[in-house]
Amino acid sequence: MNTFRVVSKSRKILERILGISLILISIATAIFLIPSLIPLIKRTPYQLLEPDPVIRHELRIDWFFQFFGWFIAYFIFRSGRAFLRDSKKPS
């Protein structure tokens, strides 16, 4: 019975560390994405009106990678939050 308590306590500590680490990684990813998002928003209206299809294609690729990065950051954050919630549950 004592072994189960030790394993359960170690699992909770590991889940807490993993949850905090994942949340910090998601915050770092978001901070990395913000500097490229602001200029992208500013140049979008001008490039949408551009008749050159190459420029509009590059704009679509930039928006896709922004969306993909925020999508990954969101799910990393949710995973970290889930680990933190699991670490607070009684075993």
Image (cartoon, rainbow, N blue to C red):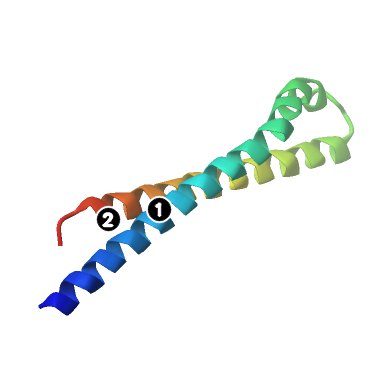
Residue neighbourhood size for the residue with mark 2, other residues' Cα within 10 Å, grouped as few (<14), some (14–19), many (≥20): many
Q: Which mark is residue 32?
A: none
| Residue 16 vertical placement versus 63 (above, below) | below
User: Which numbered marker is on residue 19?
Assistant: 1
69 vs 79, nearest the viewer: 79
Mark positioned earlier in the residue sequence (2 or 1): 1
Q: Position of residue 69 (x, y in %)?
A: 61, 46
Question: Disc 2 on helix, strand or loop?
Answer: helix
In the picture, the quarter occupied by the N terminus is bottom left
Query: Which one is in front, 5 or 74?
Result: 5
Q: Position of residue 22 (x, y in %)?
A: 47, 52
Question: Total number of numbered labels?
Answer: 2
Residue 44 image point, x, y percent: 75, 26
Whether tag 2 and tag 1 are in contact, CB under 8 A, the answer is yes
Q: Does residue 65 appear to the left or right of 91 in the view shown?
A: right
Asked if 3 appears above or below 43 in the picture, the reply is: below
Apparent side of residue 50 relative to residue 16 in the rendered image (left or right) = right
Q: Which residue is mark 2?
A: 87
Q: Amino acid at mark 2?
A: Ser
**In terms of depth relative to the viewer, which is nearer, 13 or 55?**
13
Q: Identify which residue is drawn at 81% across, 23% down.
A: 49
For this orientation, the residue located farthest to the left is 1
- Horizontal arrangement in the rendering, residue 18 relative to residue 3 (left or right): right
Residue located at (48% from left, 44% from top):
74
Instruction: Provide the secondary structure element on which disc 1 rests.
Output: helix
Amino acid of disc 1: Gly
Residue drawn 23% across the image and 51% down it: 88
Query: Residue 34: x and y, percent?
Result: 66, 32
Residues at marks 2 and 1, CA–CA distance in whole angstroms: 9 Å
Q: Residue at x 81, y 27 (%)?
A: 47
Residue 28: name its quadrant: top right
